Structure formats: C-alpha cells, structure tokens
Image (cartoon, grey):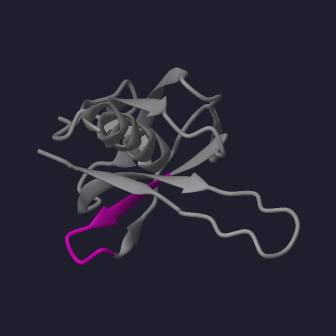
C-alpha cells in the first residue's frame, strides 16, 4: 500500500513541476553601457509540454518595465535543459521583479494547459 502511495506522489509531483528561475534575489550591477544595469538569471525547464519562456520585468505595483534580453524573448529551452540569461534594464527604471512565464502552444481543441510564472525580487 505504501509503495503505491509513494509512486502516486512521485507521479503527481513530476507532473505538476513547472520550471526553475534563479537566483531568488538577484543583484543588479552596472553593465558596460552607461545607465544600464544587468544581472544573470538561470532558467531550468522541468516541463515536457513547454519549450518557450518569456522574460518580463515589473515595478513594485506590478506594472511592466522595459527589459532587454540579448538572445531573444521568448527564449527556447528544451525539457531538462538549463540556460543562463542576461537581463539588461535602464538604471533607475523602478524594476522590482524579474519573471519567467511559460509560453504554451496549443493545437487541437479541448486541451487544458497550465501556465507557470516564477518571479525573483531584485535586491
């Protein structure tokens, strides 16, 4: 009985896994461009059904802030792969949160999908 319960829990946790976006509290530093700050974020894709993630930045009121991601946005990343992402923001932009959101491509009708978003708070 316990063996089946453990297998069920493993199956549920694997199915419900989203993605990882770290660090949780990134530190911005001056880039090589005047009035532009940067940080590196690590994105790890745990979802078999998702290949694209969009990077978004918000201020303390959850209003969008302009962000530059040199390798393109949305970012393509295969299942169980990791990518390091350079994030560039204007200095004094008011940015407070850096988020990654799964972008789903649905084909056919009647399919339900779960979008996942993970946000890190800028130190």
Give the residue drawn at x 23%, y 56%: 92
Q: Position of residue 47 (x, y in %)?
A: 55, 40
The quarter of the displayed image where residue 62 is located: bottom left
Vertical arrangement, residue 118 with respect to residue 81, above or below: below
Vertical arrangement, residue 25 with respect to residue 104, above or below: above
Q: Is residue 54 left or right of residue 32?
A: right
Q: Position of residue 79 (x, y in %)?
A: 61, 29
Which residue is more in the foreground, 51 or 58?
Answer: 51
Vertical arrangement, residue 39 with respect to residue 61, above or below: above
The extreme right residue here reads 108
Give the extent of the magenta segment: 55-62
Query: Any magenta on residue 41?
Result: no
Q: Is residue 70 left or right of residue 16?
A: right
Main SS type for the magenta part? strand
Give the residue drawn at x 44%, y 50%: 16
Locate the N terminus and report the quarter of the image it occupies. Answer: top left
């Amino acid at each position: 009985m316990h063996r089946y319960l453990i297998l069920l829990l493993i199956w549920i946790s694997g199915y419900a896994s989203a993605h990882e976006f770290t660090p949780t509290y990134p530190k911005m530093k001056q880039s090589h461009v005047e009035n532009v700050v940067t940080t590196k974020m690590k994105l790890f894709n745990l979802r078999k059904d998702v290949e694209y993630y969009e990077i978004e930045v918000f201020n303390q009121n959850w209003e969008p802030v302009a962000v530059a991601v040199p390798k393109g946005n949305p970012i393509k990343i295969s299942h169980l792969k990791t990518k390091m992402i350079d994030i560039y923001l204007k200095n004094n932009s008011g940015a407070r949160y850096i988020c990654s959101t799964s972008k789903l491509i649905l084909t056919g009708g009647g399919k339900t999908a779960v979008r996942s978003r993970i946000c890190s708070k800028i130190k």
